[in-house]
Amino acid sequence: MSADGVNYGFVFDSDDPVAMSESVTRQDRRNSNCFYSRYNDDEFIKQFRNTPCVYGPRGVPLPHRSELSSLLKDSSRIKIMCFTWNINSRPIRSVESVHELFHKIPLTGRPDVFAIALQELPSMTLRFHANMVNGIESGITDTHQTFCWVRQWSQLLIVFMKKHLCLYCTRPEYQFVASSKVAKPFRTKGAIAICFRILQRSFVFISCHFSHESIRHRIVEYQKVCAMLNFSTTLSPQSPKRGEHSILNADYVFWFGDMNFRLSDRRDADELAETYGAQLFGQRKMFAKLLEDDELRRAQMNGWAFERFQEAEITFPPTYKYLIGSNKYSRKRIPSYTVCFKLPTILTF
């Protein structure tokens, strides 16, 4: 029991097979409306089969070591950028904004992999979804292509990859864990996970949209996602059980999205906005005082959630919630950050 009287140790009933089956959407290659990968394209399959390579453990295609220097910008590391945005059901302007953002990234500064998580997509036909994927890809098409994407209701997770690197990846798997067992059309909260291997390393990308209610709900949702994601790619070689596919066995896990963890005190955020105004994002300074009131930091320190993950240093103000077209926070919302975590490990080839 915590100081505020909330039992953060509460978890969902993971032993209930009905609850698990109703909450998890697993990969169905027949449904092309919610999942796509390069392995769906005949042209890619042909190119893949004609690429000289050897096959490593788990059937991963591997180039000759001398080719790594040309395959990767840094011959021993893969550079990854994670991007998350709650677009608040704004269709046209959001497509144009994201296209412009990625198009401005210089060729020499582009990472090997872009992972993009979008929340609160407009409830319309899949046309917007296609426009968003194509709009981003058109801005980076000279270097990257769509490797895979998953859409589940109001969430979309897209992975773009440098074209030549796609040939040395395994077929991606995906799963979706819903936050609750409500009727399917209303499952706006939950987590999408994509898992695959690049060369000899396994990657899991998790995009999520957690509850806006109490911190207790968000912690339980985190625990639920960790317990219910089950990928064959992340099976530990030392595991005596074929069912142990914990995402924490992966070499790299990137978890990002709209987690809805709040600042428990909004006064410092308001003071920052008032002090710096339009220059707020130009202040390259520490926000340590502000983060003392961050729910997520508290959850990490107490071991309630994300205790094995690391977050990059925060050098910018809360990203939620601004009044549209301004640098002022909404008085009706408590400021918070969208978040990107990585499970720390050493990534070399």
Image (spheres, rainbow, N blue to C red):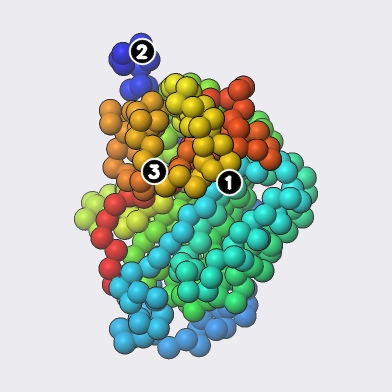
Asked if marks 2 and 1 touch (Cβ < 8 Å), the reply is no
Judge whether residue 277 can be spotted in this image: yes
Question: Mark 1 highlights which residue?
Answer: 85
Badge 3 element: loop
Three-letter code for the amino acid on which mark 2 is drawn: Asp
Badge 2 element: loop
Question: Mark 2 highlights which residue?
Answer: 4
- Badge 1 local density, few (<14 within 10 Å), some, or many (20+)? some
Compare residues 56 and 222 and report the one nearer the observer.
222
Nearer the observer: mark 3 or 2; the answer is: 3
Three-letter code for the amino acid on which mark 3 is drawn: Lys
Answer with mark 3 or mark 2, whichever residue precedes in sequence. Answer: 2
Position above or below: 60 against 208: below
Question: Mark 3 highlights which residue?
Answer: 285
Position above or below: 93 against 133: above
Compare residues 20 and 43 and report the one nearer the observer.
43
Q: CA distance from mark 3 to mark 2?
A: 31 Å
